[in-house]
């Protein structure tokens, strides 16, 4: 073979992709130099994939001993912790990575949203992504019941009771999920089957499709013309970076799991409800919302409208789409920062106002609660949001994508504030309290 490097001046070894293997098969042989910059993806998609592998591995180990029945589940967890070598550690890893899986997947969603990666040809991958976020959350949710302690039992009781508010089919749906009208043995078996069988299969299917679509879209969204970008081999440039991110993540989870045990309260007691009974942390924002709106609005209509919007997001027609550009433009970035600050101030104020000043139910005695505490506050909320969008369109000449960025930011920050208040500022009777006043 003739060596062309001398005549062209280019080192052939640097350009030629190294040998392929299973891991390498997931990566393109050559990819734009900018695509491997850490701050393009923060490695979040890869971390989510690794967390799934950790969950599957530790989950299978736990399955060897865990017994999915109301009589034996709690004892089998105690047995895992006390009698199995590294049992406590494996349970801790499964517990903490389960939490990180939800958080990292959500951060990855934020990354793809703000780096404007949901336009064609990545539209379908955004939709699969939203499906993945729902499945990851449901995976965590179905695992939440399995330890069968007071925390698990009442969190699932509180959360599944929201299903009852779905019009027409609510009670029927709740009874199907619970396998009866109360959380009991049948619920545990339902959740176990979903958690260790159905959810992992759905996750794997969606992930395979997701990765394939990333390859089909010729990698991640980058600003500028891909064809003109300098290319480097995927191996070792990208593979090594992923390896480092993966090892740091594993080290972090191991460190946490060695020093911090997964919680386990006393065995589930259906006759004694703790006060307050709280939902799993990712649903606490919704539980907080339930204190301010009628359940049909807080638990059904608002989440439903939000997720319809999320699925539909890439199919809106945009005249100014700029895939790969963070926040689309400088103004988009300003909109996001201002909206975040606004939501950070307004949400706690609105919660305090509803707590101490507003009393729609009391002011409109005789009117059904669905209207006084549901429709009217909901319409007020819609007015405020619409007013905000009109304001930024007029004042800053915000384009469609810019006001969508602003709206999305308001929703994400508000939900985060609701979650923090629900977790740390609600004591007995779900009354508003400062964290140090609780207990
Ligand atoms: C892929 C296969 C999986 C299997 C076979 C599996 C298996 C199990 C088993 C047997 C338990 C009961 C043991 C215990 O509670 O400590 C459990 C609990 C749990 N699982 Fe999984 N799991 C899998 C995936 C996942 C995923 C993807 C998530 C999160 C997104 C997750 C989150 C949880 C949580 C939060 C618990 C309760 C942990 C605790 O606090 O004790 N699991 N899982
Ligand atoms: C189990 C959960 C998920 C896994 C394992 C996963 C994995 C990945 C990976 C490895 C990539 C390649 C680029 C990167 O690492 O950022 C990617 C890209 C992408 N993901 Fe995910 N993802 C998950 C959930 C989601 C969610 C919740 C969304 C959004 C709703 C989403 C939307 C996208 C989009 C739009 C891309 C293309 C990004 C670009 O071109 O810049 N994914 N995903």
Image (cartoon, rainbow, N blue to C red):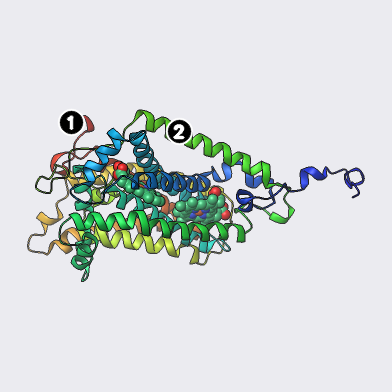
Left or right side of 58 for 22 = right
Residue occupied by mark 2: 252
| Residue 412 visible, this angle | no
The answer for how far apart the CA atoms under marks 2 and 1 are is 32 Å
* Residue 429 location, quadrant: top left
| Direction left: furthest residue | 366
Q: Nearer the viewer, residue 78 or 359?
A: 78
Mark 1 residue crowding within 10 angstroms, few (<14) / some (14–19) / many (20+): few
Mark 2 residue crowding within 10 angstroms, few (<14) / some (14–19) / many (20+): few
Residue 170: percent from left, percent from top? 21, 66
Q: Nearer the viewer, residue 255 or 287?
A: 255
> Measuring 17% from the left and 42% from the top, which residue is drawn there?
267
Residue occupied by mark 1: 437
Q: Nearer the viewer, residue 126 or 360?
A: 126
Residue 335: percent from left, percent from top? 47, 48
> Measuring 20% from the left and 40% from the top, which residue is drawn there?
426
């Amino acid at each position: 073979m003739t060596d062309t490097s001398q005549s062209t001046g280019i080192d052939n070894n640097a350009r030629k992709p190294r040998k392929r293997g299973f891991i390498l098969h997931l990566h393109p042989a050559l990819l734009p130099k900018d695509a491997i910059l850490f701050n393009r993806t923060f490695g979040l998609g890869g971390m989510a994939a690794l967390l799934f592998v950790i969950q599957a591995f530790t989950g299978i180990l736990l399955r060897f001993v865990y017994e999915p029945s109301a009589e034996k589940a709690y004892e089998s967890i105690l047995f895992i912790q006390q009698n199995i070598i590294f049992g406590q550690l494996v349970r801790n890893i499964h517990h903490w990575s389960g939490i990180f899986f939800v958080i990292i997947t959500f951060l990855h969603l934020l990354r793809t949203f703000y780096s404007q990666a949901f336009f064609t040809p990545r539209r379908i991958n955004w939709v699969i992504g939203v499906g993945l976020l729902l499945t990851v959350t449901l995976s965590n949710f179905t695992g939440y019941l399995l330890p069968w302690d007071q925390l698990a039992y009442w969190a699932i009781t509180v959360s599944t009771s929201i299903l009852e508010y779905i019009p027409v089919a609510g009670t029927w749906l709740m009874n199907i999920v619970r396998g009866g009208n109360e959380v009991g043995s049948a619920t545990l078996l339902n959740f176990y089957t979903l958690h260790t069988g159905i959810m992992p299969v759905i996750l794997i299917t969606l992930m395979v499709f997701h990765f394939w679509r990333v390859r089909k879209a010729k990698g991640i969204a980058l600003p500028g013309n891909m064809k003109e970008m300098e290319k480097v081999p995927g191996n070792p440039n990208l593979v090594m970076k992923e390896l480092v991110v993966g090892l740091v993540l594993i080290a972090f989870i191991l460190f946490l799991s060695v020093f911090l045990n997964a919680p386990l309260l006393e065995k589930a007691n259906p006759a004694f409800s703790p006060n307050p009974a709280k939902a799993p942390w990712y649903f606490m924002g919704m539980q907080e919302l339930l204190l301010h709106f009628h359940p049909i609005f807080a638990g059904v209509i608002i989440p439903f409208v939000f997720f319809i919007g999320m699925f539909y997001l890439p199919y809106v027609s945009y005249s100014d789409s700029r895939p790969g550009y963070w926040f689309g433009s400088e103004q988009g970035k300003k909109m996001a920062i201002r909206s975040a600050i606004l939501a950070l101030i307004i949400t706690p104020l609105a919660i305090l106002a509803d707590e101490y000043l507003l009393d729609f139910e009391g002011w409109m005695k005789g009117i059904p609660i669905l209207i006084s505490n549901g429709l009217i506050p909901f319409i007020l909320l819609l007015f405020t949001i619409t007013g905000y969008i009109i304001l930024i369109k007029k004042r800053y000449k915000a384009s469609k994508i810019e006001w969508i960025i602003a709206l999305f930011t308001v929703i994400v920050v508000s939900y985060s504030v609701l979650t923090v208040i629900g977790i740390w500022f609600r004591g007995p009777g779900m009354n508003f309290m400062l964290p140090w006043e609780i207990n």
